[in-house]
Each structure stands twice: as structure tokens, then as C-alpha cells.
Image (tube, rainbow, N blue to C red):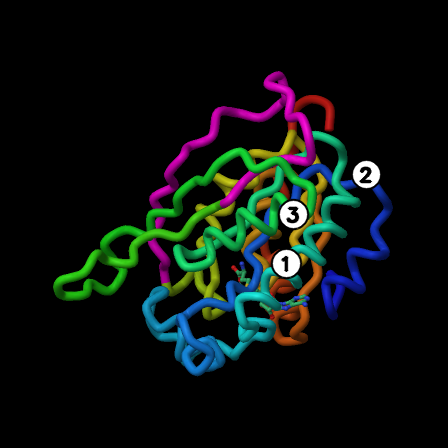
Amino acid sequence: MFHGDCLRYLEQIPDNSVDALITDPPYSSGGLHMGARQQPPSAKYLQSGGGCNRYPEFTGDQRDQRSHLRWCVLWLTEAFRVLKPGAPVCLFSDWRQLPLTTDALQAAGFTWRGIAVWDKTEGVRPQLGRFRAQAEYIVWGSKGAMPLNRRAPALPGVVREPVRRKDKFHITGKPVALMQAIVKICEPGGLILDPFAGSGSTLVAAKLEGYRWLASEALQHNVQVASERVNSVSAATHVGPA
Ligand SMILES: C[S@@+](CC[C@H](N)C(=O)[O-])C[C@H]1O[C@@H](n2cnc3c(N)ncnc32)[C@H](O)[C@@H]1O
């Protein structure tokens, strides 16, 4: 795993060489105004499974809306270059950043194909008189045409998976079971790119499902956690051609 800025990493990857982009970038969300948005992630994302103070802060989550959009287009444009034609892309987003995320995806050249839902279940903190903030979203698309005969299964539009403490190693850590459902959009044995690896949930899922992966992460602590997690699981082997 590359330790450093994803833009420095992406520029080293050859054109048309990656089979899927599956990533959970910083959302720069958590508030409609700068004062709220510039709080540390531990203050903004309290409801995500609780216990945020157990995890180190992370970086890149304080941009205002205009600069966040420009930055997303920057890294997505590099990701577009490195993906193979027809390759799928999946980007996590919350409700506030959904419009920006779908704009950024398309501005970078991808074809937007839909939104899947991560249902975090009723374990998420309820709020009196309001809807529970129970879902996050997977904005998905492809690099141009995406043939219907790709070697990938029919995927669920909603993945219902709680955040479990024993499976969470990052303030915004995603459950491995959720990521195992999502990585299957990649053709068997393919190469998955996650430029914002965090604690490595995508990489663990990729390895468990028999995929190869490429990843970057800005913070050394997360690089170490992710590496240990990936090394602790055994890779599945796929039957059939990679
Ligand atoms: C939302 S978290 C990913 C969490 C991950 N899905 C997990 O389950 O642990 C985003 C990660 O991107 C990293 N990050 C932020 N800006 C970055 C950049 N420019 N290059 C590489 N990593 C970056 C942060 O340190 C953070 O760990």
C-alpha cells in the first residue's frame, strides 16, 4: 500500500490497467456551514457506530463545497485514466454529498449508472421527530459502456449490514461484509483500486473474495492497521480465468 497522497499514487499507475475503482473518500460533510464542517471527524461522525474517540482523526475532510468538488474531479479524473474501458466505479457518499458526488463522477468522465444503499440498520442512533440517519450511499457507474455480459453476478440494490465494534478500525470504517457485497461488481480475480484505504476494509474484502488490489492512504497509522488486517485474512482462489 502506498503511504501518501492519492494523487501522487494515481499518477504512477499505467493507463487502462485497473478493473474497478471502489472507494470511500473523505466526505467533507457533517455540517452545512464551515464552522461545522471544519470540526474534526470524531466530532462530525458521532452517530456512525458510536465510540468515535477510540479511533484517530483522519485527514482531508474539511474542504468547503466548491473545493471539495474540484478535488474530487481531480482525483476521479486520474482514476478514470487508470481504469480499463467498461470498468465499474463505486463511491461512498452520505446524503449531504450525494449531488456533489454524482456531479464529480460525471465531470471526471464516468457514466453514472445508479445509487445503491447501505442500510446500517436500526442500530444507528434514533432522533426524536426525525428520520434515523440509517443509510449511506454507493454512487456507481463505469468508464464508458458496460457490457451486460460482464462476468459479475446480479448485485443487491440495498445492503443491510450493521457496524459492529469488533469489525471497526476507523472513525468511518465500513463493515467487511458490506464491502464483500460491493467488490463483487468487479470481474473475478480483477484488480481493485482504493485510493482512500483507511483501515483497509475494501482490501480485506477484496482479498477474501479473491481479487487483487492497489491502494493508497495518507496516514501512517491507517496504513499499518490496514496492512495488518489484510495480512490476517486468507485469499479466496477463483475458479476460472482471472
Ligand atoms: C472515509 S475514510 C476511509 C475508511 C475506510 N473505508 C475504512 O473502512 O476504514 C477516508 C480515508 O482517506 C484518507 N485520505 C484523505 N485524504 C487522502 C489523500 N489525499 N490521499 C490518500 N488518502 C487520503 C484518510 O486518512 C481516511 O483514512
- As drawn, which residue projects farthest toward the top? 149
The residue at 35%/73% (across/down) is: 46
Amino acid residing under circle 3 = Ala
| Real-space CA distance between mark 3 and mark 1, rounded to the nearest whole angstrom | 9 Å
Of tags 3 and 1, the one toward the viewer is 3
| Ligand 1 located in image quadrant | bottom right
Q: Is residue 74 visible?
A: yes
Amino acid residing under circle 1 = Cys
Say which label, 1 or 2, has the lower sequence index: 2
Amino acid residing under circle 2 = Asn
Q: Which residues are magenta?
A: 139-164
Return the x and y of residue 110 as percentages of the image width and height. 65, 40
- On the image, which quarter does residue 122 sit in? bottom left
Of tags 2 and 3, the one toward the viewer is 3
Say which label, 3 or 1, has the lower sequence index: 1
Disc 2 packing (10 Å; few <14; some 14–19; many ≥20) = some
Return the x and y of residue 112 as percentages of the image width and height. 56, 37
Q: Which residue is mark 1?
A: 72
Is disc 1 in contact with disc 2, using a CB cutoff of under 8 Å? no
Of tags 1 and 2, the one toward the viewer is 1
Q: Nearer the viewer, residue 207 or 183?
A: 183
Could you say whether the residue bearing mark 1 is in a helix, strand or loop? helix
> Quick check: 37 above or below 80?
below
Could you say whether the residue bearing mark 3 is in a helix, strand or loop? helix
Could you say whether the residue bearing mark 2 is in a helix, strand or loop? loop
Is disc 2 in contact with disc 3, using a CB cutoff of under 8 Å? no
The residue at 69%/31% (across/down) is: 144
Q: Which residue is mark 2?
A: 16
Return the x and y of residue 64 as percentages of the image width and height. 54, 72
The residue at 71%/37% (across/down) is: 19
Q: Nearer the viewer, residue 89 or 124?
A: 89
Q: Which residue is mark 3?
A: 107
